[in-house]
Image: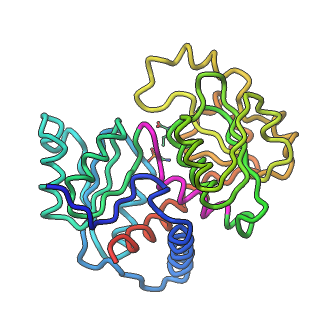
Amino acid sequence: ATTTDVRHFLEITDLSQAELETVLERAATYKRAQERGEDHADLAGQTLGMIFQKPSTRTRVSFETGMTQLGGHAVFLGEDDIQLGRGEPLKDTSRTLSRYVDAVMARVFKHENIEVFAEYASVPVVNGLTDDAHPCQTLADLLTIREQEGGFEGVSAAWVGDGNNVAQSFVLGCALAGIDLTVATPEGYGVDDAVLERARELGGDPTVTSDPVDAVSGVDVIYTDVWISMGQEDERDVRMDAFEGFQVCSSLLEHAPEASVMHCLPAHRGEEITDNVVESEHSVVFDQAENRLHAQKALLSWLLE
Ligand code: CP
Ligand code: NVA
């Protein structure tokens, strides 16, 4: 039942360093083509299935419009709109969709669920966020950093806040790209040891601290995300206490006066970031959001080549 000759994108490390560079270069090309109004219908006649077990604004709209711009089509499959929501197994959904569509993007809770889905799929499967990883976000983030900094050489970044799905993929992405990263999280909310280990295997050397000021001092990029991810709503009170002092605010930015501030969005102003920082000239959050579109178009056309 398993298919091994299909490329999936479940984690940013499913790309080699060279492949990452190829996809980012293609993303920049698509961005220019779109800005100039040039035709780039490279996926004419192809269909992307999009499974969502959690809500989404950016992921849904960027994949759907991306497929349209590439001359193809996307089908939105909310969990409760398909039989998955009534208990049809993922492995059956995977094999069925594989007979219709050319690629599947899925946003699920457990990371192992997307691995099962991919194991049974005979078309490329793209991770649109799991509890552990958000590699499409990392692609867009790396494209944004490349635009801001002109490349990755000598770039330093700090992750401040929860060591969540977005953080974990960013840690791996920085290792692949050669970005010097410090991760500042409260005790008990760090990225998984296995992720740090993988980053080191890839040649990265992430510094781990629980001091946000230390982490951001003099860096080029500061990145944060929500303290309460989708599915963690019951942990609100304990998380709000744990993350005190980890807010990205003006006084933290005094230690990194030149830094770009990144956030995958949606932002919870007054929690992990202040309104004035989101609205400041440091903020590149809407470039990141836009770059989801260009990066994912590049990824899809590369996977479907
Ligand atoms: N950043 C991101 O994935 O946003 P959505 O949840 O809106 O898709
Ligand atoms: N960490 C957040 C990211 C949302 C795009 C979550 O998982 O809810």
Q: Nearer the viewer, residue 56 or 140?
A: 140
Identify the residue shown where x is 39% and y is 53%.
10
Instruction: Please indicate whether residue 137 sits to the left or right of residue 147 in the image.
Output: left
Residue 274 appears in view:
no
* Magenta-drawn segment: 131-145
> As displayed, is residue 127 above or below residue 295?
above
Q: Is residue 206 magenta?
A: no
Percent across and percent down for residue 257 are: 86, 47
Instruction: Please indicate whether residue 27 sits to the left or right of residue 121 in the image.
Output: right
Identify the residue shown where x is 20% and y is 38%.
80
Query: Could you tell me which quadrant the C terminus lies in?
Result: bottom left
Q: Quadrant of residue 138?
A: bottom right
Q: Residue furthest bottom?
A: 38
Q: Nearer the viewer, residue 86 or 23?
A: 23
Instruction: Please indicate whether residue 45 sits to the left or right of residue 16 in the image.
Output: left
Q: Quadrant of residue 64?
A: bottom left
Percent across and percent down for residue 79 are: 23, 41
Identify the residue shown where x is 41% and y is 45%.
129
Q: Name the colouring of the figure.
A: rainbow
Percent across and percent down for residue 130 are: 40, 41
Which secondary structure is most common in the magenta stretch?
Answer: helix
Instruction: Please indicate whether residue 255 sits to the left or right of residue 211 in the image.
Output: right
Q: Nearer the viewer, residue 31 or 300?
A: 300
Total tally of numbered discs in the picture? 0
> As displayed, is residue 202 above or below residue 115?
below
Residue 297 appears in view:
yes
Percent across and percent down for residue 74 are: 28, 63
Query: Could you tell me which quadrant the N terminus lies in?
Result: bottom left
